[in-house]
Amino acid sequence: MTPVVVAAAVAGGGGARLISSTLSHTTTHSPLTLSSQTPLSPPQPQLLRRNAVVSISLLSLFPFLSQPSPASAFSIGISGPKDWLREQKKKASRFLLAPIDASRDYLQTAYLILKESDSNDSNKDLDEVQRLMRSAARDCIIEDRNSVVSFQAKTGVEVCTFRLIVNNAASLLDNKDPVKLEAEAMLADLVRSFTMLGGVTNEADLQLASSRQKVSDALMDTIFSLEKFEQGIKDCLEV
């Protein structure tokens, strides 16, 4: 309750008199209670989603203003996705090198067969050596491909396992990178070695010691080329 003073001038014989009167003015305030208010409704899901979309849209502008695109990161060598992919390749290197290890095992097994070959079983040994040689070549020798692999190659599918290994290991390198060029040169040398080995094996007569020695030499040359190729792949992977 707030008192209000009202003053009025009353004319009289003795002059004006000031009469004051106090009026009671009552102001009523209604207390706010939770029970008397309308409860606040939670934000609608549609509004939340709309606000989130707007916020994400605004935030997505900042990387384009402050950072290069992923493509430029690959092209100009900025650390980021390219470094991450390189590390992943290093971690998976043993899987990428596994076919090379298996091919080396095939060639070494063929070499041991020749060294232990008995003239009585020369034809059987020769068949086994040729089988191991074809397995070790990994469909990289055109003449040794079966009909299915040859058809795939004609359709543009890369069937040479060693070529696929180079493409994978050197995928982060520039086309003119010396390491990549060296790996491709080693691949060409490896294919030539397998081709020569196939020719020598097809003409071999294992009943003759000189023929067995010729095949053995070709096998050792191919193993040597394979090991050089393996090192070239490791250089691409930096392992």
Image (cartoon, rainbow, N blue to C red):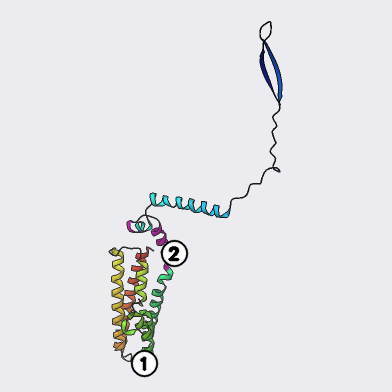
Query: Magenta: predominant secondary structure element?
Result: helix
Could you say whether the residue bearing mark 2 is in a helix, strand or loop?
Answer: helix
Q: Along the line of sight, which residue is nearer the eye, 212 or 178?
A: 178
User: Which residue is at 37% across, 68% downward?
Assistant: 168
Most extreme residue toward the bottom, as rendered?
Answer: 120
Q: How many marks?
A: 2
Select label 1 or label 2 by which is in front: 2
Question: Circle 1 is placed at which residue position?
Answer: 123
Q: Which mark is residue 91?
A: 2
Determine if residue 92 is in view: yes
| Residue 159 screen position, x and y as percent | 36, 78
From this viewpoint, which residue is outermost toward the top?
14
- Check disc 1: other Cα within 10 Å, few if <14, some if 14-19, many if 20+: some
The answer to which of marks 1 and 2 sits earlier in the sequence is 2
Q: Position of residue 80 (x, y in %)?
A: 40, 56
Q: CA distance from mark 1 to mark 2?
A: 44 Å
Q: Quadrant of residue 202?
A: bottom left
Amino acid type, residue under disc 2 in the picture = Lys
Q: Residue at x 28, y 67 (%)?
A: 181
From which residue to which does the magenta span run? 74-93
Observer-nearest of 159 and 11: 11
Which x, y percent locates residue 87? 42, 61
Position above or below: 30 against 25? below
In this rendering, is residue 64 above or below 17?
below
| Kind of element beneath mark 1 | helix
Expressed as whole percent of the image width and height from the top left, the position of residue 171 reads 35, 66
Question: Could one spot residue 217 in this view of the protein?
Answer: no
Quadrant for the N terminus in the image: top right
Residue 89 within the magenta-colored segment of the rendering: yes
